[in-house]
Structure formats: structure tokens, C-alpha cells
Amino acid sequence: MISCPKCSEVGSIMKAGYVRNKQRYVCKDCNYFFTLSNPDQIAPIKNSRRHQTTIIDIARSTGVSNSTVSRALHGHADISPETRNAVLEMAAQLDYQPNQLAYNLVKSRTNTIGMIVPEFTNSFFPNIIIGAHELLTEAGYNLTIMQSNESYPIEVSNTKAMLANRIDGLLISLTQETNNYDHLKVFEKRGIPLVLFNRVCDYVSAPKVVVNDFEGSFLAVEHLILNGYERIAHLGGPLNLLVSRERLRGYRAAMEKYGKNIEENMVIQGMFSQQKARIYGKYLLDLESRPDAIFAVNDSSAIEIVLMALEKGIRIPDELGVVGFSDNPESAYIGPGLTTIRQPTHAIGKTSAQWVLQLIESEEEMILPNEKVLKTELIVRGSSKRNRS
Amino acid sequence: MISCPKCSEVGSIMKAGYVRNKQRYVCKDCNYFFTLSNPDQIAPIKNSRRHQTTIIDIARSTGVSNSTVSRALHGHADISPETRNAVLEMAAQLDYQPNQLAYNLVKSRTNTIGMIVPEFTNSFFPNIIIGAHELLTEAGYNLTIMQSNESYPIEVSNTKAMLANRIDGLLISLTQETNNYDHLKVFEKRGIPLVLFNRVCDYVSAPKVVVNDFEGSFLAVEHLILNGYERIAHLGGPLNLLVSRERLRGYRAAMEKYGKNIEENMVIQGMFSQQKARIYGKYLLDLESRPDAIFAVNDSSAIEIVLMALEKGIRIPDELGVVGFSDNPESAYIGPGLTTIRQPTHAIGKTSAQWVLQLIESEEEMILPNEKVLKTELIVRGSSKRNRS
DNA sequence: AACGTATCCGCAAACGTTACCGATACTTTT
DNA sequence: AAAAGTATCGGTAACGTTTGCGGATACGTT
């Protein structure tokens, strides 16, 4: 006979429908609804994943409490050498691996720095990663890398994922097409340190690590001028990126300083891509009055130009001087050797990482210079050393 | 006067030592020990980190329970459209970001794949990473990358960190110096899918993704022979790596097939490094009876040889044929262009990632072929196209 | 009236750790 | 010997989620 779990009444129990395929009853006395639990139900299917030994397992096997185990494992005080040893032994025996997830949850920090780069097809960003990676691992931090693939939506979703994973700090280099920065302001609001590098923007009040694009660009163009080139073209990048604007500015400044006329039809701004480089390069080389030198915004564009020029039989550097930017590995090996501006990629990564760690470890909001500008270096190779005539 | 918090007695309170620098009392009546909490103590320093809005916040603000919020956020059933919308609205308003850590803890999976590479200074491993990254992000997984820096101890500590972070699967390429594999066997024991790629070993029963080094090597040497080279040297890698052994084997097989004599003083094995390459290269080029072709174990060695030969005035390819392995980006641009064997780096990454996901998603232990061999490709450039005389 | 069905929501137990606050048992001091 | 101090250990509440299951209401159906 069924009795009410509440008033123990037996007589006034009635069926009252089904809930999840189980008979439901109601006690008319106390108006209490209930269903009967089936004790002989099949035990829930054991999770096929093997059980990972936890602190609790160690505690049980050693006969101490969880907290003691935790203290022993972390070399805390308040524990006798004997129990510590016993615990450590048992931990080794049970092949214990701490669960960082639980640790992170309770400490609400992950010891992980996130990094978002637009791409890593050429060696530029990988080298930055190496620099950051080195410093971070040494400091006991992990690094998770994501790639926005030069796409703004992916960048946004990447930042969301980083946020969800509760990284302790973020290093980010923006996309070509990013011009809304709300996804970065979230980090400010949350108090999560953020450092922009290389592809930065002015609309976020976060530290920025950049190279001296202006100066590098200036040096490159000055070098061309000093080598006797007169009519220098500039194949630039997209103007929403600061680097493109700075390199353009350096170009203009150098031209102006030496009193060279800038022919505006020889100043082109476009997206970074090999295809675009070929199109713009062809345009410049096919100009009725061809420039005698081209300063390109990056090495891959410069190399395209060199190759096209050689195909056309234009002699480099005599008939055409070419200078690139970044010093890609292949630039040293191409035909005459590409003159270029070397960026301290390693240092960019290292500096950014260092900065984000400083921000994390500084309790009070430190007042820091909000921009660090690293030096560039002119690498002179064959593509610009004209035989003075 | 101090009164017992339990029996409110005042007379029989006595000091009873210190606990963490705080006076401790005991009530002789009820034998109750206690310390006085200091209400005017400075409030515990507020964690400077701002409060992150949680599911509970949303629940409170919306007037529903946590479970309802959770269900609403995940589009579960058993929830009315109105409450769902209310919850979602409130979530947006409070700028809720889910805490992946808590999620991972309760689900005991992280949706993250770990990857350990020996280095990423040249483009080889970055390209593999790109391939894996692409596939994994598409499948909704994250990728955390670690670098062992060609050091066995670092590799071990990396695997430990991966384990602690409860990655769902691991992709690993071994160090030059790794010859103990216990740290990998832990993954087997734990049931965590593991895939080896490129630098693999035979002593772990895990899937392996490699390229056909033997065949590639054979093709390279055969190509040299078919171009009329006779006395072909081999500059090889360290023999504890399978790749080195396979490439050596391919070299020997091709030489044998075409009845060429192998002069053992022209077969050298050494570590991967630019310096070593220069030393061995100098040795080969300075030999009293110089080889007429060199097959190098990788492109960077081959390039060193090409550069040294050009310095010495040795004409390439007429006096010396050179073939490398890997198709580094700079190989296309160097002097005459370096003939080389292209490895499908992208595919290596993609295949490995695909495989690890298969292992994760297959409930029962699937029987899979435990090795996948990807094809290599001969890229013919100027350094080996001899003008037949 | 009695029973059945559907829909929606809340409770509370996990997940594995850490750390605060006590609580013992012992040693030392007065 | 009582009182005070010391050295270790345990209990337990967090951390933020998910989820199984029970409970409640509102109808619809015999």
C-alpha cells in the first residue's frame, strides 16, 4: 500500500497523472503531490572516461583530510614532515595529476596569457610569438594563441573565447579590417590587462608596443635618395592601420626634407596581399614615366616588384631601386638581395609579454607610459645600391 | 567583559593560547573554545578584480533560479519563450560572459587540444600549426601550443602542464634528444587521445602522422642521377631521429638502384644547425676529389652549401648540383633556385588534428591504422638542372 | 469528480581545489 | 598543576556551472 511521504496517510492516496513516465500520486489529506522513486532502477551508466585520481582519493587512502593533502602538495606550513611524506608518496603511487581547472576556478586566475594574431603565414608573427613565449614560460605562464585570419568577426569571437576562458591578460595585434573596438573595451571594463602590439589603434586606452615605423620608413627613403634615386614611388598598406599611415608619413617626410617632388599618382595604398601587390606593381612599372625607385610597405610586396621587374628586363638596382619593410627570411636570398627595414620581432613579443605581466602583478593601477616604441634597423642589400654614374 | 558565545557566561572565561596571533579563550562552563572576531578589523582588501557577472546574478535580477538561467542560455527545452527572452535580455544587459572554467570543471572536458612542437624558428612547424589550427577552430576546439625548445626536460614539463590543464587531446612532435617515452604513456593510461607527428617514435602505441621521407629522399637522389650527376654526397641529420635514418635510407636505395658507388667519406651525419652545416659543407667542398652533387637533409643546410659554393666560384648547377629537403620559403628565391622536396606541412597539421578529434569523438576505442604517411613532392629548380654536356 | 498530459520551474548535488577558522594534543611556562 | 603556547590537522564554505528529478500549475479527457 502506498503511504503519503508527508502525513503517512494511506487511505486517501490517489493517482494524479504521470510525470516523465512515472506514476504520480496525491494525498487528499495534506494535498501533497509526489511520485515514487524506483530504488531498483538500473544504476546510471558509468562514465567511460577513466577516473582521474583526485585529492580526495589521496586523502582517503592516507587517512587524512583534503585540506591536509592540499597543504602537503603545496609545501605549505602547518603540516608535519611525516604526513607530508606519506601524502606525497601516496600521490606518486596513485599517479596524481592536479586538476588545474578546479584550481583556476577557486583562485579565479588561470596563469595563462592569450595572444591573438591576424595570421602566421609569414615569419613575422611567429617570431613575435617566440619572443613572448620565451618570457612567459620563464615567468610560469602559459600562452594560448588564436588566429583572427585578418577577419574582424573572427577577432571578436576570439576575444569572447579568451574572456570565457578567463585568461589573465591579452596580447593582440589587430586585423586589417578592424575599426570597431568595443570588443577590446570589455577588457578594460573587466580589469583584464590588455596590450596591443604592432597593429594598434588609438581608441583603446591600453599599452601599445610598436616599432618606429615613421623613422624606419624615413631611413628607407632617405637611403634611396642618398643613393641617387629621384622619383620614388610608395606602395603602401591600408590606411586604417596605423603602421600604414606612419610609413606613409615617413616617406613623405624624407621626400620633403630632401626637396623631392612627390608624384601623387605614384603613391598607392592598398590591402596586404600578394595579388594586390602584383596589380599595383604592374601599374607602377607600366607607368609611361616609370619611377626610378619603389619603397614598399612590406617585403612580400617588394619581392613581387623585384620579380616583375626582372621579368620585364628592368635592371635592379641600376634602373630601379627597391626597398621593402620587415626583413623576411627570403629577402636576403632574392636576386640582388632586398634592402629592407628590420623589425625587432623578438623584442616586440618580449616587451609586450613583459608589460602584460607587469600589469597583472601590479595591484594598484600603475601609471605607465602607454606606448613603447622599438627601434628599426636599415639593412642594405643589393636592390638599392646603385652604381653611381 | 567577555562572554561565552555559547552559554553567555561571563565569569568563567579564560585565555587559552593563541591561534594565528589572535587571543584564544575557553569557557570553563561549557568547555567551549573560541576566539574573538574583530568587527572593526579592516575589511578584507576587496579583490581589486571587478566582479564578473555570473549566472546567479542573472537569476536574481530576473527572479528565476540558476537552473532556469542555465537552460535559457543554452536554448534547452523546458522553458517558456517569455522567461527565456527575459533571461537573455538580462544577460546582455549585465554583460554576462560565461565562465568556461566552471563549465569545463563540471563537464570535465575543455574543448582544447594541446600541441607541443620542438621549435618554431623556421616556417616548418608554424605551417603545421596553421593546418591544425584551421581544422580545430572549425570544429569548435581551441588550440594551445607549447614549445619544447628541443629539450627533453621541457618536453616532459610541457606534457605535465597539458595534463593538468585537462586538454582533450595532444598533438606532439618529439625533441631531438627524446628517448624516454614514459611521459607519453601517461596519456594512454589516462585515455587521453595522443597523435605523434613528424618526429615520431615506435615505442608509443599512438597514431603517427609522417611524410614519406624515404620516398622523398629517393626521388631527390634519383633526380640528381637522372641529371647526370655521378658522385653524390649526403649531408644527413642526427641518426636518432627517424627522419634522418629514412632520408639516409632513401639516398642509399637510389644510389644502389642506379649502380652508383657510395663513397662513405661523403656521407655525413650531424645535428641540425647552421654552424654544423657550414663545417660539413666546407669539408665536402674542400675534398681533394669533390663530389659533383650534394643532397642535404634540409634546406637550410643546402642553402649554406650553395652560398659557400658561390663564394668559392663553383658554378651551380654545372659544377655542383644541390638538392635540399622541406622547401623553405627562401629556397625559391636563392641564387639559381634550390631544388628540394616539399613536405605537405599544412596537411600534416590537418591530418593530425583530424585524427585526434576522431579519437575523442569515438566512444569505443576505434581500431585505426596507426600510421599515416603523407606524400612528398619534388620541386625542381635551378640548383640541379645541369646543362647536359 | 477522477484521472491524464504538458509545460515550466526550482532544489540540490556534483566537478576538484583552496583557505579560513577552529579544534585537538602536546609542550612549555609560570 | 594550572595556564599559556605550539604544532598539526579537520570541517566546510566558497568558485560558477550543469543536470536529474521532483513539484506545481493549467488544462484536457474520461
Image: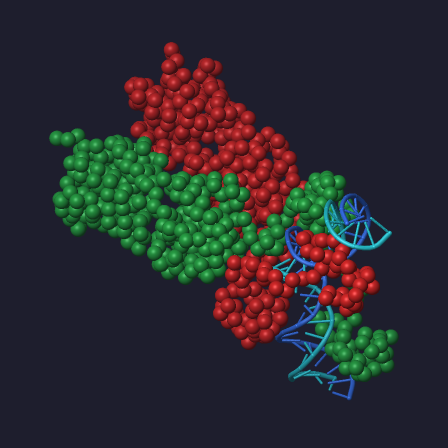
Chain colours: A green, B red, C blue, D cyan
Q: Residue at x 57, y 48 (%)?
A: B357
Residue C24 coordinates in the image, percent (x, y): 81, 53
The C terminus of chain B: image quadrant: top left
Number of numbered callouts drawn: 0
Q: Quadrant of residue D29?
A: bottom right
Could you say which is closer to the camera, residue B108 or residue A129?
A: A129
| Residue at x 39%, y 57% (from the top left corner) | A205
Residue B136's place in the image compared with B267, above or below, is: below
Left or right: residue B148 versus residue A29 is left
Say which residue appears at 86% left-offset and 78% top-offset. Answer: A10
Query: Looking at the figure, which quarter contains the N terminus of chain B?
Result: bottom right
Please tell me which residue is depicted at 56% across the width and 72% down the height of the picture: B61
Residue A58: horizontal and vertical position, in percent?
73, 46
In the image, A121 versus B267, the foreground residue is A121
Camera-side residue: B16 or B162? Answer: B16
- Asked whether the viewer can see residue B135, the reply is no
- Of residues B248 and A5, the one drawn nearer to the viewer in this rendering: A5
Left or right: A253 with respect to B307? left
Q: Quadrant of residue A282?
A: top left
**Vertical placement of A330 versus A3: above or below?**
above
Q: Is residue A233 left or right of residue B309?
A: left
In the image: residue A231, left or right of residue B298: left
When the figure is inspected, residue B291 is found, relative to residue D22, above or below; the finding is above
